[in-house]
Image (cartoon, rainbow, N blue to C red):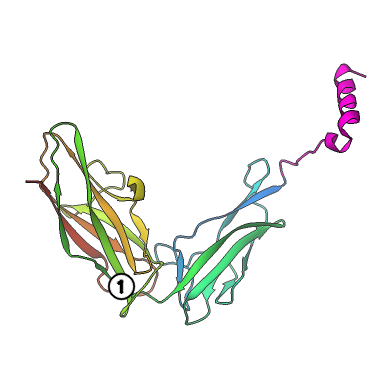
Amino acid sequence: MSRRWSLLAGLCATVGAVSCIELSVDPTAVGSIEFLAPSNPSIVRRDTLRDTTGAPERLRARVFSTGGDELTDIEVSFVNTDSVVTIRDGNLVVSLLDTSGSARIYASAAGLQSIVRTFDIIRRPDSIAASVAEDTVSYPAPATGTSIDTSTTIGFVVRSGSNTVASVRVSFELLRGGVPLAVNDTGTYALVRAGGIVSRVDTTDASGVAQRTLRVRAVAGTVLRDTIVVRANVSLGGAPLKGAPALMQVVILPAS
């Protein structure tokens, strides 16, 4: 017996045989399931889950082995734990009732279960409007370096009739001179969420409001006198919302 195995045998005799069992894991076995986030967090009453273009969106999940490789030949099913929706062939989620509520769904494969995702069942939105039509940013002009102004909040309200609607995905664009700024064009103007993170998407809160902060970055020696338009839209399928796309104008001026 080699010295290595002699030492191992002695250790087993000391601490007990159970602690010396060698466990092996098949790296090709199913190890985890990722339930992919849908484009929209909500479903309109008596409609199906839809993507950002308004087309029906199927539930999707990815299966991974214990070794971290994606397994594309494993069958995945989706389980609905609530009666307000049903999952039809092709993994389409359909709202069954003309009432609001929520539906919890998870993915399952090879005996494993994913996280549970909650889908809100909402009234169909029919309008969107800016909280205010126009605002002004009076930014501090820096003597050296740069200054950043985040004093202006851009808000839009989504309604269904006289009721506001929560859990609606709202997308934003910035326009300068009528031309949309590229998503990665954030040097001077950007929409940001908490923590200063650039973000052009928000979900309406309990009061039906989706909002972002306008960040204005000014460089010493450069004077900004500008007009920026924020454009907001909703894509849930069906007829376009009244007021869509909604616009808010922001005038940029140096502080006097």
Residue, x 47% and y 82% (percent of image)?
Answer: 98
Residue, x 85% and y 20% (percent of image)?
Answer: 4
Q: Residue furthest bottom?
A: 98
Residue, x 27% and y 53% (percent of image)?
Answer: 213
Quick check: 138 left or right of 118? Answer: left
Residue 141 percent across, percent down from the top left? 13, 40
**Helix or strand or loop: what does disc 1 sit on?**
loop
Residue 240 in view here: no
State whether residue 163 is above or below residue 248: below
State whether residue 188 is above or below residue 4: below
In which image quadrant can residue 44 be found? bottom left
Q: Residue furthest top?
A: 3
State whether residue 34 is above or below residue 235: above
Span of residues in magenta = 1-28
Residue 192 in view here: yes
- Label 1 crowding class (10 Å Cα cut-off): few <14, some 14-19, many 20+? many
Residue 155 percent across, percent down from the top left? 27, 62
Write down the residue under mark 1: 241
- Viewer-proximal residue, 45 or 82? 82
Picture quarter with the N terminus:
top right
Q: Does the stretch in magenta take in 256?
A: no
Q: Does the stretch in magenta take in 15?
A: yes
Q: Amino acid at mark 1?
A: Leu
In which image quadrant can residue 124 be found? bottom left
Residue 167 percent across, percent down from the top left? 41, 67
Residue, x 28% and y 47% (percent of image)?
Answer: 182
- Viewer-proximal residue, 46 or 167? 167
Q: Residue furthest left?
A: 256
In which image quadrant can residue 60 be found? bottom right
Residue 236 percent across, percent down from the top left? 39, 69
